Image: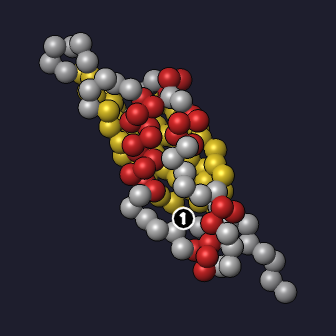
Amino acid sequence: MVLEIGMGTDIRGADPTKAAVRALRDALWHNSLSIANALGLDTDSMQVEVTIGVPYPDRVDKAAVLAVLPHGTGTVNVIEGGLEIANDAGDDSTLIAHAAAIVRLDLPAEG
């Protein structure tokens, strides 16, 4: 039904979960999905497939990312991606994460 995309950063601290959560919020918070209601379905019937691209994907707390979803149920797949930018001193970096959220609905059969 819908593909939403977003970007999130952790400017200081290089926390991949923080960047991933911000990326998903960026994707979701720029939209108001009224399609479920328009079809006579509960918004909690939405199924959301989230993919996060971020450096250090094994360090992302998937439950924290999933907690961002305001409606429906979801899955989170974290892959290597995004961008890491080291500071001049080399003792910290900025992480950039990208998020894609695919929203699906099971539609009732016509007839």
Kindly identify which residue carries mark 1. 2
Residue 59 makes an appearance in the image: yes
The one of 101 and 17 positioned closer to us in this rendering: 17
Residue at coordinates 73% horizontally, 66% vertically from top-left? 106
Residue positioned most to the bottom: 111
Which quadrant does the C terminus fall into? bottom right
Secondary structure at numbered mark 1: strand
Residue 65, given in percent of the width and then of the height, sits at: 52, 40
Q: In this view, does 101 lie above or below 109?
A: above
Residue 45, given in percent of the width and then of the height, sits at: 69, 63
Residue at coordinates 38% horizontally, 26% vertically from top-left? 15
Q: Is residue 25 above or below residue 105?
A: above
Q: In this view, does 25 lie above or below 86?
A: below
Residue 98 makes an appearance in the image: no
Residue at coordinates 41% horizontally, 58% vertically from top-left? 29
Crowding near the residue tagged with mark 1, few <14, some 14–19, many ≥20 C-alpha atoms within 10 Å: few
Residue 62, given in percent of the width and then of the height, sits at: 57, 34
Which quadrant does the N terminus fall into? bottom right
Q: Give amino acid for label 1.
A: Val
Residue 51, given in percent of the width and then of the height, sits at: 54, 43
State left or right for residue 47 relative to residue 95. right
